[in-house]
Every structure is written in structure tokens, then in C-alpha cells.
Amino acid sequence: YVIGFQKNFNEELPYDNEFTGLKDRIVIKFSHVVAENSPKGLAAAYFAQRVKEKSNDRIEIQVFPNGMRYSEATEVAALQRGEIQMIAPSFSNLNAIDPAWMVMDLPFAFKDQAEVDQALNGELGKRLSQTLDPYGMKGVAFWSNGFRQMTNNARPIRKPADFAGLKFRIQPSQVLERQFETLGASTISTPFNEIYHSLETRTADGQENTISNIFTKRFYQVQRYMTISNHSYLGYAVIFNKSYWDRLPSDAKLVLQEALEETTRWNKLKTYENANRLNQLQQTGDIKITYLSDDERKLWRERLRVLYPEFTPIIGSDLMDMIQGP
Ligand code: LMR
């Protein structure tokens, strides 16, 4: 799928987004594509609750989960038009606006969540957020999901050679496309809420995702094998329509900022849910789980290392220096 982005966006927003006084009730529509019981879905609900409490019911965050209103392909354009005021796309969905975001998709770029947090709380996070401004978007936080794992229907995957000839569903990202090509597989890019169907109909043999996404969207019903590879990271940029944000009354902005900070901290705790979800996945008995040995992981790393020199000219060596790498 292709994401609808428009640069230098400054269309007038509809009248109902105007604030005429500090006492106005404020309704913020927040659209996302994942399940309500996933780290992003839970964070969205927590954020809505904290905002409601902190604003004494003056500000309402209306959450639209599961891509019920907009898919990844249409949510950015809807945000720019002011139909919704808030989204939290995953990093891969922002590659199309600036190649800087590709750095987050590189396999084995981060050892663990702490390394990701350090990068996003520092210069890298600042540089990534800045790329949103020309698109009329304001980045206000980064939320986490966790590391990606591989699932497929053909065979347990341990070694790079096990990928040969398989087709994987990916998000629209050159890095992810090249990752699978380098492993001898092909790719097809589909919106998140079409994954189940494409696996069921064998349009794709496999896909990569976090444990919580695999569990909450029941991919285990249509996939036979899962490899715990933790090969790359899946996180989110929390984004407001910029002109909407800029025109919010300052006291409302303060409430939102405080609630965002609390939610971001809380979301970090919830990403550990991935461990519980792994137990639940195991209990379904529907999917055979393979754990990579250190030696096997090393083989993946060695094979995928070629992506680093390949993407350095696209991403820029200054940003590449901000991650640890394989
Ligand atoms: C995917 O499309 O696989 C995920 O990025 C969806 C999400 O937002 O977690």
C-alpha cells in the first residue's frame, strides 16, 4: 500500500476545530490500527482516561482502534485534513515522508528497549520529530510496542537459508523489503488489518510482528511457526495535527502534555506484556515456537549486516552513528 502524504500542508481546518474560549469542550479524535488490548491500544485508552480526569471532563479523547475509521494508508491524509487530530503510526509508516525513519527499521539496530529509549530520548528522537513539521504534523511522544518476531506457514525458521522462496507481508519500508530479499524471500506490503486475510488465503506465507500484535490479531490461527528472533524494533510516533495543536488553549496543551508524559511512562511498562502474550500464544497450542540459539542469531546478523552500508547514503551517516548497529 502507498501512504497519502502531502507536504507543505496548510489547508484551513473546519470550523468545529476552532476554539473560542478557554471553557470550550474539546474533542480530540485519535485513530489507530491495532487492537485495544495491544500496547498502543492500551496506551491510547490510558491517555484518554488521564486527559478526562486531569481536565475535569473538559477534554475528551475519542479513540478509534482497529483501523475502523482509517488504515495506515489513509490516516495521515485524514490527520492533515483535520478529520482526526491525533494518530500514532509505526515508524515504518513514516519512511515515506523522510528516509531518516528507516534507521528504526534496520535489523539488529538496537540491543534492547533501553537502547531504543536512549536513542529516541536523545538527538535521534529530536531529528526524527523534526521531519514531521513540513507535513503539518507535530510529534509529541514515542510509544513502544517491542521487537519483531517472524511467523510463517512453511517451516520452522532457524537459519537464513530457511527463508528461501517464502513470501512475507511487510509494512511499506525499503529496509524491510531489502531485509527479506537479503534472506532469500520476497515481500508484499498490506495494511495491518488485512494481514490475517492475506495469511489465511496464502497471499503471504509469513509476516513479522511483535508478539502482542501476533496474539491480539490471532495470526496464530493462520500461521504454523513462529521464531523468536527480536530482529528489529516496532515503535510509534504519537502525532497531532500541527495547526490544531498550535491553536489549542495553553491550559489544554498543558493537560495533554502531562497526560502524554504519564502515558509514555506507563506504555513502557505495558510493553513487557509481550512476555505474557508469549505464554498465552504457547497455551493456544496453535503455533510452534522456535527460539534462536546465539549462534543462529549470529548468522542472521552476519547476513543482514550488508544493509548498513547499503542504507547509509539514504539515511545519512550522522543518523547511522546514533544507533549501535549489528
Ligand atoms: C504493522 O503494520 O505490522 C504494525 O505496524 C501495526 C502497528 O501499528 O503496530
Image (spheres, rainbow, N blue to C red):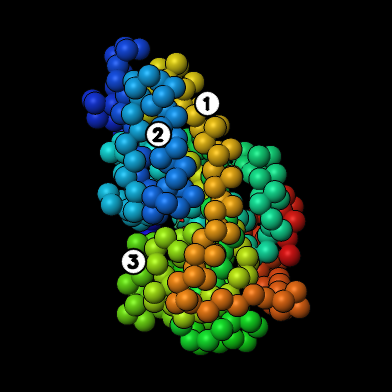
Give the amino acid type for the residue marked by disc 2 in the picture. Answer: Ala
C-alpha separation, residue under disc 2 versus residue under disc 3: 27 Å
- Could you tell me which secondary element the residue under label 1 belongs to? helix
The residue indicated by pointer 1 is 258
Taking the image as drawn, is residue 19 in sight? yes
C-alpha separation, residue under disc 2 versus residue under disc 1: 12 Å
Who's the residue at 61% across and 63% down the image?
Answer: 232
Circle nearer the N terminus (3, 1): 3
Q: Nearer the viewer, mark 3 or mark 1?
A: 1
Taking the image as drawn, is residue 102 in sight? no
Query: In x, y percent, where is residue 31?
Result: 35, 44
Give the amino acid type for the residue marked by disc 1 in the picture. Answer: Glu
Circle nearer the N terminus (2, 1): 2
Q: Nearer the viewer, residue 262 or 8?
A: 262
The residue indicated by pointer 2 is 48
The residue indicated by pointer 3 is 194
Q: Is mark 1 within 8 Å of ligand 1?
A: no
Q: Are marks 2 and 3 in contact (CB under 8 Å)?
A: no
Who's the residue at 64% across and 75% down the image?
Answer: 291
- Could you tell me which secondary element the residue under label 3 belongs to? helix
In the displayed structure image, the side of residue 15 where residue 326 appears, left or right? right
Who's the residue at 41% across and 24% down the image?
Answer: 53
When the figure is inspected, residue 128 is found, relative to residue 169, above or below; the finding is above
Give the amino acid type for the residue marked by disc 3 in the picture. Answer: Glu
Residue ranking furthest to the front: 283
Query: In x, y percent, where is residue 103?
Result: 62, 56
C-alpha separation, residue under disc 3 versus residue under disc 1: 35 Å
Q: Residues within 10 Å of mark 2 (few under 14, many from 20)?
A: many
- Could you tell me which secondary element the residue under label 2 belongs to? helix
Q: Residues within 10 Å of mark 3 (few under 14, many from 20)?
A: few
